[in-house]
Image: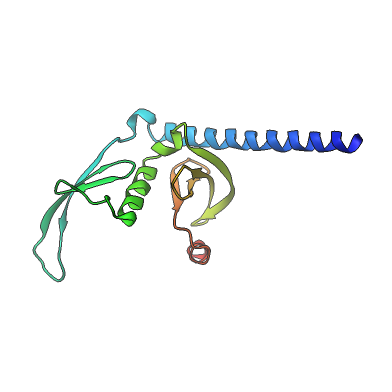
């Protein structure tokens, strides 16, 4: 009987610890968004114009793009993400840059261990969403500014980046 009691207490402590870490992750994100201007300042649609050079040409072609998160990327009236997994994934990544998916109720956030980037301490969360790859988002510990986003993570490449 005593063994069952110890097991029950251990399971309760593990569950409480996971819940507390999820709350810490949510608090970190809320603070970062607040310091970045607040949730109401997060862009819903991103539009940009840029010169586009083809090959060695010195003549720029004007190009306008419209990103409608989380997965639509329009250029010249055509959704470039349709049927293009790479472009869809990049559109999702740009949405992550806005921090909007971190606030979505269907997002799961997991607190990550502290690390460093450029010698500065960083704190982070792992963003988990249905039908998306997990993405690790790090903020500078001191001011909560976005410091790094790890996606398509290749551990050896990340180690090289962290070394300098």
Along the line of sight, the residue nearer the viewer: 155 or 86? 86
Residue positioned most to the top: 40
Where does the image place residue 17, in percent across and percent down from the top left?
Answer: 68, 36
x 52%, y 65%: residue: 163
- Answer above or below: position of 86 versus 47: below
Kindly indicate the quadrant of the structure image that contains residue 25: top right
x 48%, y 32%: residue: 30
Along the line of sight, the residue nearer the viewer: 87 or 47? 87
x 75%, y 37%: residue: 11
Where does the image place residue 19, in percent across and percent down from the top left?
Answer: 63, 34
x 78%, y 38%: residue: 10
- Answer above or below: position of 142 versus 153: above
In the displayed structure image, the side of residue 41 where residue 21 appears, left or right? right
Q: Quadrant of the N terminus?
A: top right
In the displayed structure image, the side of residue 44 where residue 10 appears, left or right? right
Residue positioned most to the left: 59
Residue positioned most to the right: 1
Along the line of sight, the residue nearer the viewer: 155 or 70? 70
In the displayed structure image, the side of residue 69 where residue 135 appears, left or right? right
Kindly indicate the quadrant of the structure image that contains residue 22: top right
In the displayed structure image, the side of residue 101 where residue 61 appears, left or right? left
Residue positioned most to the bottom: 56
Where does the image place residue 102, in percent across and percent down from the top left?
Answer: 45, 38
Kindly indicate the quadrant of the structure image that contains residue 27: top right
């Amino acid at each position: 009987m005593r063994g069952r009691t110890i097991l029950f207490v251990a399971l309760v402590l593990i569950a409480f610890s996971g819940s507390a870490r999820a709350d810490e992750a949510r608090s970190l994100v809320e603070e970062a968004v607040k310091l970045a201007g607040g949730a109401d300042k997060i862009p819903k649609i991103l539009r940009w114009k840029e010169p586009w050079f083809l090959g060695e040409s010195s003549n720029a072609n004007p190009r306008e793009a419209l990103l409608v998160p989380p997965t639509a990327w329009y250029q010249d009236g055509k959704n470039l993400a349709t049927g293009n997994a790479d472009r869809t994934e990049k559109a999702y990544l740009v949405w992550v840059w806005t921090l909007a998916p971190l606030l979505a109720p269907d997002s799961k956030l997991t607190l990550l261990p502290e690390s460093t980037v450029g010698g500065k301490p960083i704190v982070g969360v792992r963003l988990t969403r249905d039908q998306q790859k997990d993405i690790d988002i790090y903020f500078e510990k001191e001011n909560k500014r976005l410091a790094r986003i790890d996606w398509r993570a290749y551990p050896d490449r990340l180690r090289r980046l962290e070394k300098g």
